[in-house]
Image (cartoon, rainbow, N blue to C red):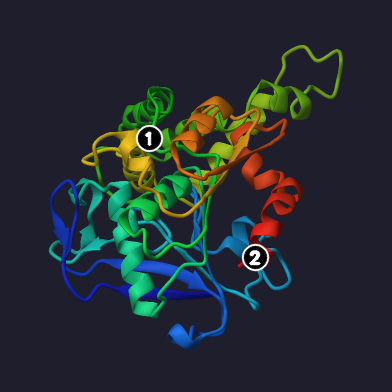
Amino acid sequence: MTRHLYTAKEPFPFEAGGSLDHLQIVYHCSDRPYAGPSDPRKVIWVCHALTANSDPEDWWPEMAGPGKLFDTEKFFVVCCNMIGSSYGSSGPATTDPATGKPYFFDFPATTVRDLVRSQNLVREDLGIPKIDLLIGASIGGFQAVEWLLMYPDVVRNAVLLATLARITPWLTAFEESQRMALEADQTFRACQDLTGGREGLKCARSIALLSYRNGDGYNRKQQEPDDDTLFAGRSASYQRYQGQKLADRFDAYSYWYLSNTLDSHNAGRGRGGLKAALGRVRCRPTVIAIDSDLIFPPGDMQEMARAIPGARYHEITSHYGHDGFLLETDQLTALLKPIINEL
């Protein structure tokens, strides 16, 4: 897939207030350019998760690429990097032209609906009249839900994977705990440079992993290799490794902004409530839950599916909780292949 940079032609207003004169969105798409409405290829639009980038071949290599389920040669595959991310789209880490420094906390507060409106600008710029299959997991699923409600005439088929139509207090508690970790790092609010909050980010990532996985997965993978170990340390080492790994590729300010974006998610806001909003979804989405997901449990996803007319519900099994959407690719392929074949 090829990386592109879209720059909005007009000022972009944010739902919570504020605007940017030159909003930029990084996106990846199939190498062969889209030829407009006459292009015979079906369009697959992928909405990425929290700290992923806009290249599904990078973070979903078993699913996206030439010859894969999301065949980038057979289909026109698109994925946009979210506003607020550290992978090139406008966000707190990008340079404020008024100061020549990163925006830091002067960047506008961003909602899920802002993410979708920005992506729709990319769709229009590419000349795509319809999205034949929209798929999103986690916060990508939040975006997919909003696509169905904001642009109902655009999306023909959708997959809502490990997600919900409104953030739960349980998930917000995890997000606030991570923000507290960032703010406990005294360099975070100092806003000297983009290394600020680095140690807090490592801790925030450790907290996040506890929500993404579960006890079963940890107990299977992080057991001590020596039965006579005096102090258990393998799991501790894993947490520190994962914290370091994220800090090496992401900045704390982008993470903080995206965490707050999660908390904006409520598909029923201004639409008469959640049940009324979901009842207006026009396509028949496929809803896929993971049996061990701690933050989007099957019961909650079943309730969402029941509220959407004609929605089809499936469940995959995994020892690894929410991260199962990245790991259980064989099960996902089995569920998604019939949908792909019907496009």
Indicate left or right for 63 with 251 as reference: right
**What is the x, y in percent for residue 318?**
71, 34
Measure how far apart labels 2 and 1 are at the Cα level: 30 Å
Residue closest to the far front: 310
**Which amino acid lies under the numbered mark 1 shown in the image of this protein?**
Arg
Under tag 2, what secondary structure? Answer: loop
**Can the viewer see residue 46 in this picture?**
yes
- Marks 2/1 in contact by CB < 8 Å: the verdict is no
The residue where tag 1 is placed is 166
**What is the x, y in percent for residue 130?**
44, 71
* Quarter residue 339 falls in: bottom right
**Which amino acid lies under the numbered mark 2 shown in the image of this protein?**
Glu
**Is disc 2 surrounded by few (<14), some (14 to 19) or many (20+) residues within 10 Å?**
few
The residue depicted at 33 percent of the width and 53 percent of the height is 84
Name the foreground residue: 310 vs 167: 310
Under tag 1, what secondary structure? Answer: loop
Indicate left or right for 141 with 254 as reference: right
* Quarter residue 219 falls in: top right
Q: Which mark is residue 342?
A: 2
**What is the x, y in percent for residue 178?**
41, 30
Q: Which mark is residue 73?
A: none
First along the sequence among labels 2 and 1: 1
